[in-house]
Amino acid sequence: MKKKNLSISFSRRVVQYTFCIILSFIVLIPLYMGFVGGLKSNGQLLTDPVGLPNPPYYNNYIDLLTGSVGTFWKSLFNSILVAAGTVILTLIVCVMAAFALARVQFRGREIIKNYFMLGLLFPLAVAILPLYLQVKNLKLLDNYFGVILPQVAFQIPMTVLLLRGFFLHIPKDLEDACSIDGYGPLGFLINMVIPLSTPIIATSAVIVLVSSWNNFFLPLLVFNTEAYYTLPMGVMNFQGQHASDWNLILAYLTLAMIPALILFVTSQKYIVAGLTGGAIKG
Amino acid sequence: MKKSYSQIPLLVFLLGPALILFSLFVIFPVFQAAYFSLFKWNGLGPLVDFRGLKNFTVLFKDAIFHKAIIHNIIIMIVSLVIEIPLALYAALIICNKDFKFALVFRTFFFLPYILSEVITGILWQFIYNPQYGLVKALYTFFAPGAPVPAILGNPSTVLAGILVTIIWKYFGFHMSILIAGLQDIPEEIKEAAKIDGASESQITRKIVLPLIRSTLLISIFFSIVGSFQVFDVVWAMGKGDPVNSAETMVTYLYKFGLQRFNIGYGSAVAAVIFLFTLIFSIIYNNQLMKNEEKQI
């Protein structure tokens, strides 16, 4: 009996490992091909797209990194600027709003909270046309703020929800202690609430960062000049211009993937928790 | 009561920025979209050409829009029938406490999710490319001499090709959500069942699955709502073409609303996307409530 059970669970394990290994190959092969493809000349890529580059061909990366082909650095810079602006502004605006909604008693608090939560119902696509006109009227087309401000606005519901939930659980005793020390509500926010909330603030920052980094739809509408293109737009544009130079395109793709991969490898646990945890709480 | 007076400047300072940004860039445009959808308007000049519901009747008669709706529904069904079960199976394996290399596999599977949709889409364009890609390599290996299919260039295969990419990119996200749910199950419950003689599959079916029901429902919800908003991946893999064979509601909105300066018509499309999302959320929530009540 025991033996039979053992063999059943052994064969089950074999199936499970086989499943995971095959799935890993399916996940990794496209990434691998992108990576090695960038290290081949167009001719090498045409004759052997799968094998290791022999010899490795570095000119794609040299051309891209020296700027003789494409605008990689400019796009990278734009992506970083837009992401940094979005993350910083979202955090400032949402920490303040969530604090008011969690720790200040006032009439209409529920109404304002529900007003923000309304935003969870509206995806960007629903508002995109009037939003485009709005950005245009505010003279923010081809302006970093034309992407940053709407991105912040669309992050408000989820971020406020996450932060408020956390702020609500900070003990009242701490607030009283703060007011005995002579701090007002803002003193309490800066000296107590923010330091105590670093984990949830970091989680929110990760969610906002990744969504800004990957955003394509909004920059596509707002940025019409190549000088403003973020990485996703830069990649798309580059592919359009070098349609048959797949070796160059793959090198560009690999470069564009590197920042996200570095972030992922260095703080993986954190990112997984942030992205999925945020999703669950939302 | 006296206090609430002195609070006003504080509240304005704390809530003002969020309220202004949110109203200006989310709420206001959404209501404008509803209003614009009743007009024929190119986005310039005064809004005078009132058409009532004409935009909607034209929209619902357009065969291309029919295609787009069907494609969105196919994406939804495939996500529910293939992506979520795949994610669930992977999550169950990885959460086995004596499964080796769980963290390595988990890392691999989550990896595609952090890449941008556009980068993913272009990478897969390469994979499918009949002159350069993986498909060509497989054909040269297994069927040398046979013509290599252009998966993204063929109206009957393009959507399937994109669906593979979508599953590739998102199943790891759902897996991670499910793992988070599985990790909340106390190990003692499973141990107790094991001592009572329950097999591994019995534990999974009778104990684990019912306990992660709510997490599973969240995953399904994300999958449904996400299915109606697919744009970037499709756009990066051929803009919904050839002959609109991979058109989705949002690519349709972009092409027929923005690119042709039909703001009114495009807004009608946006309203329909919103209604789809809303109806599915409501049905879903109601069913959920009903079932939860039954359980109690």
Image (cartoon, coloured by chain):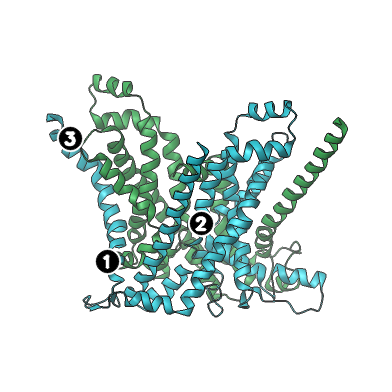
Residue under numbered circle 3: B7
Mark 3–mark 1 CB contact (< 8 Å):
no
Letter of the chain shown green in the rendering: A
Q: Is residue A32 above or below residue A63?
A: above
Q: Is residue A115 above or below residue A227?
A: above
- Whether residue A201 appears in this view of the structure is yes
Q: Nearer the viewer, mark 1 or mark 2?
A: 2
**Quadrant of the rendering where the N terminus of chain A is positioned:** top right
Residue at (26%, 44%) from the top-left corner?
A111
Instruction: Residue type at mark 3: give it.
Output: Gln
| Secondary structure of the residue carrying numbered label 1 | loop
In x, y percent, where is residue B206?
Answer: 66, 37
Nearest to N terminus: mark 2 or mark 3: 3
| Secondary structure of the residue carrying numbered label 3 | helix
Instruction: Residue type at mark 1: give it.
Output: Lys
Picture quadrant of residue A93: top left
Q: Nearer the viewer, mark 3 or mark 1?
A: 3
Residue under numbered circle 1: A139
Residue B224 marker: 2
